[in-house]
Amino acid sequence: MINGYEVVVGLEVHAELSTATKIYCGCKNSFGLEVNTQVCPICLGMPGTLPKLNERVVDYAIKMGHALNCGINRICKQDRKNYFYPDLPKSYQISQADIPLCHDGYLDIILENGTKRIGIERIHIEEDAGKLLHSDRFDGSLVDFNRCGVPLIEIVSRPDLRSSEEARIYLETIRSILRYIDISDCKMQEGSIRCDVNVSVHKPGEPFGTRCEMKNINSFSAAVRGIDYEAKRQIALIESGGRVVQETRRWDDAKGESVSMRQKEDAQDYRYFPEPDLLTIVVSEDRVKELKDSLPELPNHKILRYIKDCGLSRKDAEVIVDVPEKAELFDGCLELGCKASRLAANWIIGDISRLMNEGRQISELGITPERLKKLVEYIQDGRISNASGKIVFDELVSSSGSQNSPDIDAIIEEKSLLQVSDQAALEELAARVLAENEKSVFDYKNGKTNALGYLVGQCMKASGGKANPGAVKEIVLKRLGEL
Amino acid sequence: MKLFEYKAFELSDMLRDGKISSAELTKSVLDRIDEVEPKIDAYLTLCGESAMESAKQVDKKRMRGEELSRLAGIPIGVKDNISTKGIRTTCASRMLEGYIPVFNATVVDKLIKSDAVITGKLNMDEFAMGSSTETSYFKPTRNPFDTDCVPGGSSGGSAAAVASGEAVLALGSDTGGSIRQPASMCGVVGLKPTYGAVSRYGLVAFASSLDQIGPFGRCVKDVALLYDCISGYDRMDATSKNTQRVPCFDSLTGSARGLKIGIPEEYFAEGVEDSVKNAVMDSVARLRSEGAEVRKISLPSTKYALSAYYIIACAEASSNLARFDGVKYGYRCESPKSLIDMYERTRSEGFGREVKRRIILGTFVLSSGYFDAYYKKAKLLQERIRAEFDSALSEVDVIVTPTSPFEAFKLGDRISDPLAMYSSDICTVTVNIAGLPAVSVPCGYSGSGLPYGMQIIGRRFDEATLLNAALSHESLMGGFASPKL
């Protein structure tokens, strides 16, 4: 809510699919190669060429449809969207108009105070266009056609989002799902995921306001900024007695403002009609089911499970789920029946995340679910201290890749890290330390309770760090009480 | 008789038996081109040198005893909207005046694989839009039977080349009659195959859902020979069909015994000249006397066909021709002031009147608010026309109609009256709308010596039955009569 107005947001997300080849020809689907090298007569739309549908694109889109709980139109068509632009070599984009491949689904996003269901209107397949290049070194524009024919899905939400924050979470959840089901690289900076934003404002209880569409949003944070800007602009307009007009606006992230591109009356007429060069798409029921069964557990479901079953905070669960390798490691521990799952999560969020941020992969860290489970269970059982756990972990990491990477027990043995929890030995140790520190004992008895910490510390020191601090503290307290 | 005057199937035997060489044959055709081309103007691009070169290559292969196809060494012309690698493919448009494709159409690859000799690229109406070859940006082609008359269109260059001996065979394309109508007007045989029988890959699209490439020849056997070469499934064309096909040439018997012929009354109605009707009905009578069974049928939606055709064809054309925008290839206007200026002037200057007319028409019928009233309705009519044909063809084997409602007309007679021009497609467009195969065969001559054509329509992917009916008619009628040039 801003000044008593509710913000209503709907999103259109375009995601490039990571198929090996383009949607209608055999050209490689890859980013960052030399301009106009990943092209052929078909994706250049040369006269007489015909498209041929890459079936993998349909599979990928159906997977996303399942992930977003959509109905699947097993029989659907492709349509031509006609408009002129130099980056569009055929002067039409093959897309889907009235019958999208997937329809009427939803996505549960996880907010601070629970989940919220966001409606999904449709998901359809289409081809990407090329890119215009501008430079001071030449007049006019050049066109790079490499991106022409890269497969896209467009995911259209219903206007169910109520803030820029909800929009951000929605976008992050979509991206996370695309990664989990492995159909898109989701690299915003490479343009592999882009979005258009529809924003309107209204007072609660009143009908929806007139919406504006914003284009040219190139990052999730730009989406947040764009929505906030647009909501404020519309509210200010209404408050000053004006009226919001339906229009398409262009977001300028550098300037932090949007400018009108065209109003409703000038809306382009795309003259959609069925693509006569392609056959009706027909997907068998078996195939639809097969694709559904092939889906992994989705990240939003995973987060909820970690919160519920492992007692993780939403934030911690998100950190783990955000990177599929982390979640895989964590799930590996859970599957082995790890009794210290909170601790395992902490290690993943802490040391393992730190190493991954340095660019290392879990697979090369020598940290398997088995090892992580053993490490955290040893720490939880008090067999080794947290500090020793760190030594073991570092040893595992530094020796990973070497031929005889040692196992955890061997490292503990070799570095004599086993924590002393033997009652008799600890009693003896405590007795000795208390005898040697009469002043501190005296202080404690006189109410200086922080002397306890000193005494426990001395015990730990005397044990060479191997004593179980919890057990030591208990014994020292007991003995002090008896004195 | 000179070599260029023989039929392809005869030449094929002569080549196989070593009686002639392809070089001699090709030379004969090239000489004929030198002789009559100034009067006919069938070619836009001549490939004399490369034709002689490939003829010699085929002769060498034959000398080495290699197994060769029936088309090996036969000179064939190709309509200029069929993509030929390294050979300019203009679609008879200023827009593509200097356009040289980097790839071959599938049918061209098939010709090359069969060692056919490609003589050059043939004139046509611009982007195949027209019925007289007069909308060609470069020049009109003349009818070999009367050079004051049009050869029909849009494949007028193909029909005229085959009729005048400037090619033994030719490829054309047919969207609403563009093979059959000029075949009829030039007294040759032209086949519009079933939609999906021949790959469209490399055919510069006019109306994708109606276009089909097909063969021209001076007799039915020649057409069968070329059809067998170019047809078949192509993974590059999603609309090409993977069906079990009978090689037509080998299955021809020429017998009409037991053939059930349907005569649809709607095709013998007003607008069709009586002399044409009579020529067709005389031919039907001859077939009946040879044992064919003739019955009247009705295709009541025929009267809507021309309207539905022009809506669907123009709608698709408006989109297909949008790629000619001056950005990538072909014509670009001089010193554009802006992107919009470049689009507007490139397309205004690069396209001719008829093409622009159809683009505007197609853009209109697809526009928001008009789509349902035009395009959608036309598609519904298409369904109905298709169903009527299917029902009729479950009762009869073939349907016989006139091809063109009138014989070839004089140059300039109809070019300024689009509706008069469009009406020459009245008997042929339904076949494209229904996706059926149909052949035009000569069936007589007008008082002034201009040929009449009879159209035989068959069942989907049953070109064999269709061509067999055509062959029986041809044997009763007598063969191709060369025009006096």
Image (tube, coloured by chain):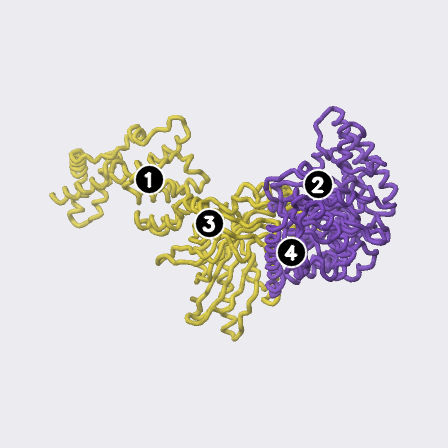
Chain colours: A yellow, B purple
Mark 2 vs mark 1: give the one in front: 2
Q: What is the chain identity of the residue bearing mark 2?
A: B
The quarter of the picture where the C terminus of chain A appears is top left
Please give the residue where the numbered disc 1 appears in the rendered image. A333
Q: Which of the 4 image quarters holds residue B230? A: top right
Residue A135 located left or right of residue A250: right
The answer as to whether the residues below labels 2 and 1 share one chain is no
User: Where residue A478 sits: x, y (%)?
Assistant: 14, 43
Give the alpha-carbon distance from disc 4 to disc 1, as whole Å. Answer: 78 Å
Q: Which mark is residue B267?
A: none
Q: Residues within 10 Å of mark 3 (few under 14, many from 20)?
A: many
Residue A382: in sight, yes or no?
Answer: yes
Please give the residue where the numbered disc 4 appears in the rendered image. B297
Look at the numbered discs 1 and 3 and tell me whether their residues touch, using CB distance below 8 Å: no
Please give the residue where the numbered disc 3 appears in the rendered image. A64
| Residue lying at 51% horizontally and 54% vertically, measured from the top left | A100
Residue type beneath disc 3: Met
Q: What element carries label 4?
A: strand
- Which one is earlier in the sequence, the residue at label 2 or at label 4? 2
Q: In the rendered view, would you say B373 is above or below A188?
A: below
Q: Is mark 3 on a helix, strand or loop?
A: helix
Residue type beneath disc 2: Gly
Residue type beneath disc 4: Ile
Q: Which of the 4 image quarters holds residue A105? A: bottom left
Give the alpha-carbon distance from disc 3 to disc 4, as whole Å. Answer: 52 Å
